[in-house]
């Protein structure tokens, strides 16, 4: 069965946690597409060449979850040649047999507009910055400034800007416990799975 769940949203909204939980619940494969861009960003050198030659080992680096890697990912993700190099990999993953969950910023709008489920996971910048600060520490005001800067870059880029697909279900996690957000996401998947099998 080919069944794609596309989960988009800004940094620290909870999309990664929700994606992993959905994949586990339904036995689907999971791809955090942000890791692809983080790996390209931290590799250095020519970003397009790094994207074309990405390996599994590059995705296992220990420094991919840092704030610096996130900023580097946002910068290289704005480059059309980097996006182009990574698009086909993501599309193959998404439409492979057995079901797949992909999370990122342009999955439902660009990578998999035909996805059976599209979710847009968001939260206020202040809530997201606080969550990120709890993860990475440092100066919370600086983390908030970086979250807002990244949002502006991700939403304002010419190529595949971050936005909700017109047919996406929005989940605002600002005042939700993670279990509640996962339950909402799973309910959407169950409903669409039922329709796909009917």
Image (cartoon, rainbow, N blue to C red):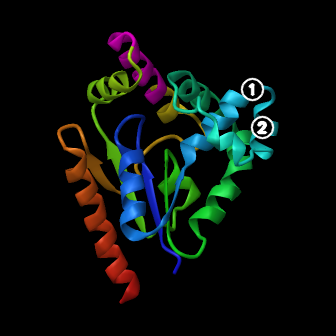
Image quadrant where residue 197 sits: bottom left
Image quadrant where residue 151 sits: top left
Q: Which residues are magenta?
A: 138-151
Q: Disc 1 marks which residue?
A: 44
- Quadrant of the rendering where the C terminus is positioned: bottom left
Q: Are marks 2 and 1 in contact (CB under 8 Å)?
A: yes
Number of numbered discs on residues:
2
Magenta-colored segment: predominant secondary structure: helix
Above or below, comparing residue 44 to residue 12 in the picture: above
Image quadrant where residue 148 sits: top left
Above or below, comparing residue 174 to residue 18 in the picture: above
Q: Alpha carbon of mark 2 to alpha carbon of mark 1: how far?
A: 8 Å
For label 1, count other residues whose C-alpha is less than 10 Å away and answer few (under 14), some (14-19) or many (20+).
Answer: few
Q: Relative to the observer, which residue lies in front, 156 or 88?
A: 88
Q: For the residue labelled by badge 1, is the local secondary structure a helix, a strand or a loop?
A: loop
Label drawn at residue 111: none
Which percent across, then down, holds residue 41? 67, 30
Which mark is first along the chain, 1 or 2? 1
Which percent across, then down, holds residue 72? 61, 26
Q: Disc 2 marks which residue?
A: 50
Q: For the residue labelled by badge 2, is the local secondary structure a helix, a strand or a loop?
A: helix
For label 2, count other residues whose C-alpha is less than 10 Å away and answer few (under 14), some (14-19) or many (20+).
Answer: many
Say left or right for 1 vs 170.
Answer: right
Residue displayed at 39% across by 12% down: 138
């Amino acid at each position: 069965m080919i069944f794609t769940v596309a989960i988009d949203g800004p940094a620290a909204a909870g999309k990664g946690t929700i994606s992993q939980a959905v994949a586990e619940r339904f036995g689907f494969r999971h791809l955090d597409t942000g890791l692809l861009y983080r790996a390209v960003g931290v590799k250095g050198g020519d970003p397009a060449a790094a994207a074309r030659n990405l390996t599994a080992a590059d995705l296992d680096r220990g420094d991919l979850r840092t704030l610096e890697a996130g900023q580097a990912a946002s910068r290289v993700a704005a480059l059309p040649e980097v996006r182009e190099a990574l698009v086909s990999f993501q599309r193959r993953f998404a439409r492979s047999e057995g079901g797949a969950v992909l999370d990122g910023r342009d999955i439902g709008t660009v990578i998999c507009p035909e996805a059976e489920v599209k979710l847009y996971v968001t939260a206020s910048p202040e809530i997201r910055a606080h969550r990120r600060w709890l993860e990475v520490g440092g100066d919370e005001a600086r983390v908030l400034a970086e979250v807002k800067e990244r949002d502006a870059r991700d939403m304002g880029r010419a190529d595949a800007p971050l936005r909700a697909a017109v047919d996406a279900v929005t989940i605002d996690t600002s005042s939700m416990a993670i279990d509640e957000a996962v339950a909402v996401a799973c309910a959407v998947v169950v409903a669409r799975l039922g329709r796909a099998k009917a």
